[in-house]
Amino acid sequence: MKQRKILVTGVDGQVGFELLRSLQGLGDVAAIDRKKLDLLDASSVSRVIREVAPDIIVNPAAYTAVDRAETEQELAERINVAAPRVMGEEAARSGALLIHYSTDYVFDGEKRSAYVEDDVTNPQNVYGRTKRDGEQAIAETGCDHLILRTSWVYGMRGHNFLQTMLRLAQERDELRIVSDQLGAPTWSNTIAALTANIVARGPVDGSAGWWTERSGVYNLTSAGSTSWADFAESIFDHAQLQKRPAVIPIESTAYPTPAKRPANSLLSHDKLVRVFGLQPPSWQRALELCLAR
């Protein structure tokens, strides 16, 4: 039986690192880091994909410096829009599946309930706009694709809210944390595990229309909701710290940032459950497992 060849980009990042482990056993996995793949160079992206000749391209690599993107718009566009477009073109040319990750920031956060995949996008910052444009660029290529929107990603690697809280807990007695933004903190391992489950459900010997029928956007986050302030409290509850800082809830207006954040980042999982039969774990359980590891 033919073994699938899976190309994973951004393996130095928090999601890419977890994907590299979760996808083992599902095919011949080629790990591509930033030294091998220059996302700023379209010819580099094409060349690497053609050399590997994958059946599945998994692309967690992205420009994710949300605030810096406000002044580095061209850089964000080249990585988040132009590079995914080339990946889509190469996938369409070879018949490969492209799995790409997007964000809750494609929405404006004004909706009172969880966003579904078909809701109108209205990004409020450069990062969100480039991720939305990247989604559209992939769809326009006509390749088989899964665009997985996630939110509030954290893990024990890289720069994220969890790492920041653990560091600040050692430095400060009091932390002022935003409490009027709601979302579902999502462990990078959860993203990788659910992705691997999706891949495992697909055919080994080419797509044969299976992926074409299921192509589109899917929301993929932990279940449940919380605020940044309550997320911080939960981190301190489970981290067994020697010194625990006091968390002072504040409104977003008291903590201005260059990039505007959505007040509501909740994403519905109904489509993920309906199409792939996958139910994400609660954010609380995932956090416990992350910190226990």
Image (cartoon, helix red, strand yellow):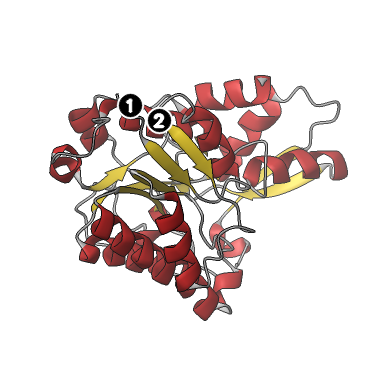
Q: Are marks 1 and 2 in contact (CB under 8 Å)?
A: yes
Give left or right: position of 59 versus 219: right
Frontmost residue, 231 versus 176:
231
Quarter holding the N terminus is top left
- Check disc 1: other Cα within 10 Å, few if <14, some if 14-19, many if 20+: some
Q: Give residue 165's position: percent from left, percent from top.
A: 71, 42
SS class of the residue under badge 1? helix
Residue drawn at the location 40% of the way across and 71% of the way down? 82
Image position of 73 with respect to 58: above or below = below
Amino acid on which disc 1 is placed: Ala
Q: Is residue 185 visible?
A: no
State whether residue 48 appears in this view. Answer: yes
Marks 1/2: CA–CA distance: 6 Å
169 is higher (above) or lower (below) than 36: above
> Which residue in the protein does label 2 denote?
196
Q: Which quadrant would the C terminus be assigned to in this image?
A: top right
Q: Quadrant of residue 65?
A: bottom right
Task: Say how many tags the image has.
Answer: 2
Residue at position x 20%, y 41% from top? Answer: 211
| Residue appearing at x 66%, y 25% in the figure | 291
User: Residue 200 has which mark?
Assistant: 1
Give SS at disc 2: helix
- Residue 151, position in %: x, y? 45, 46
Within-10-Å neighbours for mark 2: few <14, some 14–19, many 20+: some
What residue do we see at 50% from left, 67% from top? Answer: 44
- Relative to the observer, which residue lies in front, 3 or 133? 3
Asked whether, in this view, residue 130 is left or right of residue 175, the answer is left
Q: Residue 290 is drawn in which quadrant?
A: top right
Image quadrant assignment for residue 87: bottom left
In the image, taking residue 12 as reference, residue 93 lies left or right, namely: left
Q: Is residue 268 left or right of residue 262?
A: left
Q: Disc 2 residue type?
A: Ala
